Image: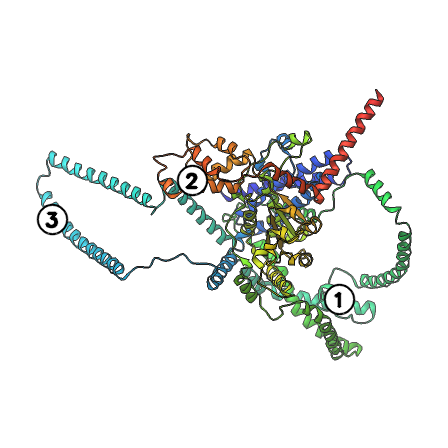
Amino acid sequence: MSQATYNKVWTDAQKDLDIQLRREREEFLQPEKDRVKVFKMLVTSYIKYMQIFRNLEMAYDQLIHRQKRTVIRQVLDGVMGRILEVKKEMVGLDNSEFHYIDNILEDLKLLPEDIEVPIPRYFIKEKLEVLQQREKILDQILLDAGLQTQKPLKVMTFEEAIKVIQVAERARQGRCRAAFMKQIYLEERKDRQTKLQVQMGPGPDDAATCIQKVWRGYIQRKKTEKMREEEMVFLGMSLPPHLMATSILQMHAEQVNTLQGEVQERQEEVFIKDKLREMEGLNIKETLQDQIGQCFIECRHIIGKFPDYPTKEAGGSMAMLSQKTPEQVALELAAKKEMASQKKAQKGKKEKEKEEKEKNKGKTPQKSGTKEEEEGWKMAPSNFLSIMEEGNSQYKAIWQNRDEGWDFLQDHDPELIKEEKREEVEEEIRVQVDELMQEKLENLKLAVDGEKSDKQKKRRKGEKKKKTVMRKKIPEMEEDLTPDRTIDSLYRELAEEGLLIKAKTVNLSDYVGEYSYLGTTLRQADTEPMPSLADVRQLIALYGILPLGSQTVHEKAPLVKALLLAGPAGVGKKMLVHAICTETGANLFNLSASNIAGKYPGKNGVQIMLHMVLKVAKQLQPSVVWIGDTEKIFSKAVPKAEEEMNPKQLEKILPKFLKALKAQDRVLLVGTTNRPFDANLKPFCKVYQKIILIPRPDYASRFVLWKHIILQNGGAITNLLNISCLAKVSDGFTQGHIVQAVQAVLSELRLLQMTRKPLKTAEFMTSLARQDPVYKEEEETFKAWYAKTPLGRARIRALEGSKKAGKGKTNKGKGKN
């Protein structure tokens, strides 16, 4: 696809965004009482934003033009944040993390793939070098510590080495001999050809035999090459032809991507900035000096004395030249004095209001509740609408009707770079001009008014202020438990202790699962459906990957500090943790009770450990802190076998750990558990803000899983292998059970026999029968536990309220009849 195609994708996305922003202004600002209508509005806007997000991400990844990419990036971050805000409102209305919107998708004529959350590729692309370097450092630390082993190299004996050298030497001599003989043969052939040219020429029989020789030689060479290729494939020395073709295409695509990356990273700004400084630097300096000098004269004429030069913190000459006349400045100073007097008067009023509120505490909540009921639902204020509107207006002003016929390369626009860099050059020159004009002002004051500069007094005051500031900062420094340690040393220590581990390269798309099409039908029948694996994948992308990948989204979107993945063993909880790290390039810290046991003993050992983890995680963000079997930390009673591990030592410190995380810190706490019902519910739910219940796969997901895992492990699907039968038989089994069954069947020997003996259904059924499934009783315990969580209780209350409202309507109808 060309750059023109991706430009069209961008324009289409901007048009859809403009329509969506208009809809938001019209619909979401007005209060609405009908909750069903509100939920439908939110779902439709969520789907529209998801489509815009996909198009913008594609355009940002493929376009080379830097100025366009900056505008797209701004809008892209805004759309991501808005999706998270809409999701929060949907959760608040539906009282559930999982939403079943198959009926709305059907109305909009969309597929479930259209609402799949796309993961921006720039999360990894823009910091690929840093991640590769960090991976090398971590590998080296783990190798030195003996926690990771290199692939064993084959050690040869002395006799084997001599044989290898002899074979290589004989091959070299054979090649030299062949080249020598070839040269002799060519010379003899030339002599023969010259002799034949002198004669009449070859006869028909000789010509036919010559052609036959050439043709048979060509055919034999082709057969030999084919046999050699088949032999190499059989030995595992080369790839099969169908995989070879895909790998060539992949290599070509990778080359194109690397070239795009090189063009995207070209630095033209520095060259243009230097040129601007040379060409326009003197003119900018002169105009600034003239403007500031004129300001001095006007202030002296109106006020009667020269003004004080603003400090750097106040803005320097920018504060003087902020498009305000000296008369306006004088009026502002008078207004400030009036405001100060008004504030004093308001303090007394506020104190009286507080006293009145304390007296009428019991009456206020009733009034507020009735007001909310009368007004209805209203969308909460957004942090991202202004960002999207700014990007949209910038697109309309600059790019919508811009003629780009002259720009064949589509890599940058020099005029726009000049406009951007001119401001930077002005700021740099302004600093120099401020120093000169400050001295000039002091000289003018001395010459005209006879005032002396008070630099020495100011310096002394500044020294006194510095001393007081240092005294205030001493307690803050005491909070740092490792003030003398560098981040590199802490990083090395955590890696050597096994707390900082290497994440497995697993993408979120590898978590295979199908969308549930019966959610709405089951809810209409008053039965709460179990979420599908596609819903789980969507929540991981929304709460885990998008905020960790983008700093703007993490700071302004609804903050999620902790995430809990609960479900039976084998449903892929650990895989999802590794997928979050892979998609965002995050560091992975393992603080499971079994992993930290005995590593930092003593009273303050755990506190120091958490402090080190927090310090490194903040410095090298994004980071994921993973606690496996997290129910042990909040368990009601510790078993005797686990008393040595002391799993409850993190229970009191984890809330403090989460309080230390600010909005700007891209650090996520992820807990995994297969027995959440063993923990005390209140402290458990206080720590983990978001709880995602992961079920065993349904029929559709199992059907896709069997296919995917068999092909992934080198198997081939034929008519003898009934995937539908396997999906039905494996009801109750998790993804882990299916993977184990496939790996047990597809051994190396079985893969070699597969061409002669195709795979059959019975082979997988026998290996699956050796494992224990997830029974309905266990699934019901998970459902019952989730119903006790805050969101589960809110869902039950909402259902009970809707049932009562339905009964009230029916009773009214009966009374009328």
Whole-Å distance between the Cαs marked 2 and 3?
66 Å
Q: Secondary structure at mark 2?
A: helix
Q: Disc 1 vs disc 2: which is toward the camera?
A: 2
- In percent of width and height, residue 740 lies at 48, 42
First in sequence: mark 2 vs mark 3: 3
Query: Residue 745's mark?
Result: 2
Q: Secondary structure at mark 1?
A: helix
Q: Amino acid at mark 3?
A: Asp
- Describe residue 345's horizontal placement relative to residue 660 as left or right: right
Residue beneath disc 1? 295
Q: Disc 3 vs disc 1: which is toward the camera?
A: 3
Whole-Å distance between the Cαs marked 3 and 1?
99 Å
- In percent of width and height, residue 270 lies at 55, 61
Binning the other alpha carbons within 10 Å of mark 2 as few (below 14), some (14 to 19) or many (20 upward) gives many
Q: Amino acid at mark 2?
A: Val
In the rendered view, tell whether residue 723 sits above or below residue 160: above
In the rendered view, tell whether residue 154 sits above or below residue 766: below
- In percent of width and height, residue 434 lies at 69, 69
